[in-house]
Amino acid sequence: MSASTAVVSVRDMVKTFGATRAVRGVTLEIPRGSIFGLVGENGAGKSTLAKLMAGIESPDSGVLTISGREQSLRDPHEGIKAGVSMMAQEIMLVPDATVEQNVLLGSMPRRGPFPNRKEMRRRYAELVEFTEFDLDFKAKVGSLRVADQQKVEIMRALSQDADMIIMDEPSAALTTDEVERLHHSIREIARRGSTVLLISHFLEEVLALTDHVAIMRDGDLVRVGPTSGETVDSLVASMVGRALDTDYHEPKPQADGPVRLSVSHLTRAGILDDVSFDIRQGEILGLAGLIGSGRSEIARCIFGADSFDSGEIHIDGELVRPSSPHEAIAQGMFMVPESRKEQGLVLGSSISDNLLLATHKKRSLGGWVSKRTQWAAAEKLAQSVDLRFNSVKQAVGSLSGGNQQKILFGRAAEVNPRLLIVDEPTRGVDIAAKRAIHETLEEMAASGMAVLFISSELEEVLGVCSRVLVIHRGRVQAEFKAPYDEEKVISAFFGQSGLPHD
Amino acid sequence: MIERIRNYGIVGVFGLLFVVLAFTSPSFLSLQNGANILDQSSVLLILAATTTVCIIAGIFDLSIAAVATASAIMTVNAINAVGLVGGVILGVLFGALLGLITGVAITKTNVNSFIGTLAASFTYRGLGLILAAGGLVTIENEQSAQTLRDVMEGKYLGLKGAVWIAIGFVILVGVVLAYTVWGKKVYAVGGNWQAARLAGIRSNRVLISCYVLSGIGAGVAGVIYAGRYGTGATNAYPDSYAFTAIAATVVGGVSIFGGSGAVWRGTLGILTFALIGNGLNLLGVDTTYQQTILGLLIFAAVAADQVFRRKSA
């Protein structure tokens, strides 16, 4: 491919963070007008490479060419000016500004020194027409759900009229039909002659959308080529460097132990409506449904993190009503929360302190802790959850997403609750780590723990759980047991009822 | 390497300052000068220790100088009412009580600690004024006053009693923070309040305990004042004490964002300030310039921290 047909090309790109070589001499050309996939496990260097193209990071060495001109970008603003804009994996919005202001942030139409409101409205309307995203443009972004915030990010990237738009995991937080609309927009962008660089863990999505795909592993480019010759298995084999079975284990037979958790008529005004279900000892019960359907809220109410108006919770037949997570833990529960960075980990603290966060007291001698004893305990725990680490004294912020998630499971194993709630335990986690997390969960259930498993990824819920409840608008819409009819499950997501499956 | 500089840069600065002063000023290295430096810093060493704990927990306590002042007055009043030992105990407990009130009020209402303790500071200063009936209270029993003065001002192994109290207090707080479950909780709450709560830590209780500790430190400072001067005055500790304690903590390398740091850093920060002041005095630099130099140093420390943070991110 000659330089003139490439919108962006990099040659011998190198980027190092401390001791980690995130990108090790990558050479790659992205053809103009293509939808270009970039895949790899977490920590493979995809996001870093993309950030180098957008000017968010500066390379240690290497050449970046955008539309035929060599560039040394110092910041994202220069990247946008050169024609590359990036939609980041972490949401980067101004929470107190409106949807419209956020979308047009950085490309605000002006009249003299003042924003040109009429022009803003017109450009915003154009973007809405293009994306078919339906948002209240006057709403404060901070008050939106994550999925809606992500839409704002997408619209912002589109508003910058870029030659190439980089999307880093754009569909991770979206519901199925929002994903459809996103895919439609991506195709539309390419049809209009712009280029999309798509970084995604959803390999089906990459296969369906892209025309070229590049695979990275440990900071190196493994290979690049047309997508047409690829399958999920061929991509995974290159990503992990070995063939890995992408199918899930056969689900376990239905649990028949005594009922461990019994939730009846759980109600919270406007959020949860008369939710009732049981979980048996050794059972992994799945909660599926759209984002915002109330899955996480059910978990938070049971765990005492949020309050509820009415309803009863029994654990092993005993009535409990935890008013705080502290009480819930005392009553035999534990939760691995939805967002590991905001709710799960103390990022600046060590692996050891994070693993033992809930159990420092148990490990202490009358309130005094011995660092040596703690490190030894943490080391054992870390190994039990297959954590990849150098030292238990290292800060968890330096670990990959998958390994960070394993720490939360190590913490849960240490608490050893009767009921474990896991909310999105594998979001943004690579395949190998995901497999390790599923195995840990199955071991925990096999030991008699009851597990409430929440995930937005349907295949995962169906693969891990022997029984699944679909939540819709704060209600239990339907219950399914393995083997599943996937279509029926999905239609329950959208409120289709009358499916008396079992 | 960058990480090292960020973590231990202040130790280097302190060491450099020490060596330079030792060479340029013949009187610097004398035991007498060292004892003077510690004596002048004793109250600030106490306040910086509790301030460090608060900042690690993610809160600021701007009310400590006001609490210390009110405690000094309370100590004198209590000594006059119930005698020396009871008075001293009540003086410290009064500081703890004010800290408890601040902590409960702030955590229950979710007010930002910076603003909440600023408001508390005004309130407690007013309270001091009321307790002192508008001016100055004096320990009436001459013997009690003398005994307490001897404890604070008398020399033991070359150092004044107040200095020993400060050293003991700082070590105690440092050890408790580093080696107890409570200390672990302080770091966790400061590092991620939400995560700590979901891991079963009663985050607000931990924060309240930090305000109480802060109050105890201020209470001890109040007792020291009462001992030294035999009085409790409404201007015993101006608010600059609170600001200096925070500044020293930051200069010592404690992250202003919470979740990391150690008590020795606040201590080193105060000693660095003292060394600069002392050194400038010995070198004959006009005291007029000292504040400016100190201010620039504080800014440089915070700026350096930011630069290193960005590089290691």
Image (cartoon, rainbow, N blue to C red):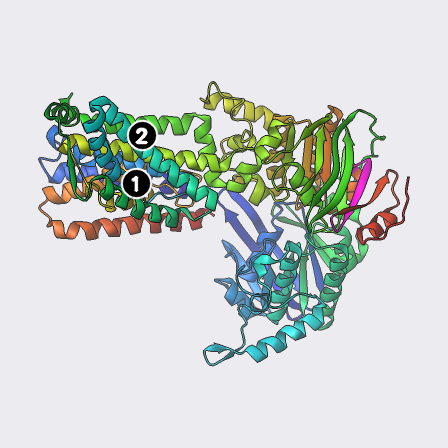
Q: What's the CA distance linking mark 1 and mark 2? A: 14 Å
Residue at image position (49%, 31%) is A393
Nearer to us in this view, A303 or A171: A303
Identify the disc placed on residue B93.
2
Q: Dot 2: what SS?
A: helix
Mark 1: few/some/many CA within 10 Å (<14, 14-19, 20+): many
| Position above or below: A335 against B311 | above
Q: Position of residue B5 (x, y in %)?
A: 36, 42
The magenta span reads A464-474
Q: Dot 1: what SS?
A: helix
Residue A465, magenta (yes or no): yes
Q: Are marks 1 and 2 on the same chain?
A: yes
Q: Which mark is nearer the camera, 1 or 2?
A: 2
Q: Quadrant of residue B280?
A: top left
Q: Position of residue A174 (x, y in %)?
A: 70, 55
Can you identify the residue that label 1 sits on?
A: B64
